[in-house]
Image (spheres, rainbow, N blue to C red):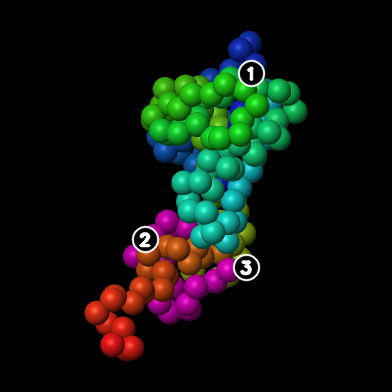
Amino acid sequence: MAAAVVLDPKRIPEGLNDSKKLSAVQREALYYLILEQATVSIASSSPRRIDLIDIRKASLDAMRRAVAGLQIEARHVLADGRDVPMGLTCSGEAVVKGDGRSVSIAAASIIAKVMRDRMMVRAGLVYPGYGFEVHAGYGTDRHRSAIVTHGPCPLHRMSFRPLKPATVDQDDRLDR
């Protein structure tokens, strides 16, 4: 899940911060303020896409698509992390730990996290027993245990190490 947010400098919501440092109640309140006071676009990558191109590339592609989906043209992109998405129509710069250093990145982080959390609550209804609504897809002990009990569901990335098929070592081949 990725979000692109263009804030109105005259209407920056009070309390923007790294989404991980905010409570769920604070994130929800800021989510609505951001949607009211800023230009927002959201994009995501499916588990299949992540498996196909890897999680880093899929995240960067979702960032690029979120920027491309803005109703106004971006002039410069601040990207959270070490990389700038390829294919932007404007300049961009990577900002490590950007959600704690830029209000625009913090706003995008809040939007993306609230949307992801809402999707995980819905996933918990569609795929009960996995606890998506509790662990939000993170590889917690409960999540790993549910995968062992129920097997993977369509939301699981098969490139996730516990689900990734074991590769056959050269010495273990049967055709020696």
Q: Mark 2 against mark 1, which lies toward the viewer?
A: 1
- Determine if residue 13 is in view: no
Under circle 1, the secondary element is loop
The spot of residue 69 in percent (x, y) is 71, 35
Mark 2 and mark 1: span between their CA atoms?
39 Å
Q: Mark 2 points at which residue?
A: 140
Q: How crowded is mark 3: few (under 14 residues within 10 Å), some or many (20 or more)?
A: few
Under circle 3, the secondary element is helix
Residue 92 position (above or below residue 108): above
Q: Nearer the viewer, residue 154 or 110?
A: 154
Q: Is residue 37 left or right of residue 138?
A: right
Could you tell me if the residues under marks 2 and 1 are in contact, i.e. CB atoms within 8 Å? no
Q: Name the residue under label 1.
A: 75
Looking at the rendered structure, the kind of residue marked 3 is Val
Q: Residues within 10 Å of mark 2 (few under 14, many from 20)?
A: few
Q: Give the range drawn in magenta.
A: 133-154
Occupied quadrant, residue 63: top right
Please tell me which of labels 2 and 1 falls first in the chain.
1
Looking at the rendered structure, the kind of residue marked 2 is Thr
The spot of residue 32 in percent (x, y) is 64, 33
Looking at the rendered structure, the kind of residue marked 1 is Arg
Residue 86 position (above or below residue 134): above
The spot of residue 108 in percent (x, y) is 56, 32
Could you tell me if the residues under marks 2 and 3 are in contact, i.e. CB atoms within 8 Å? no
The spot of residue 55 in percent (x, y) is 48, 51
Under circle 2, the secondary element is loop
Q: Mark 3 against mark 1, which lies toward the viewer?
A: 1
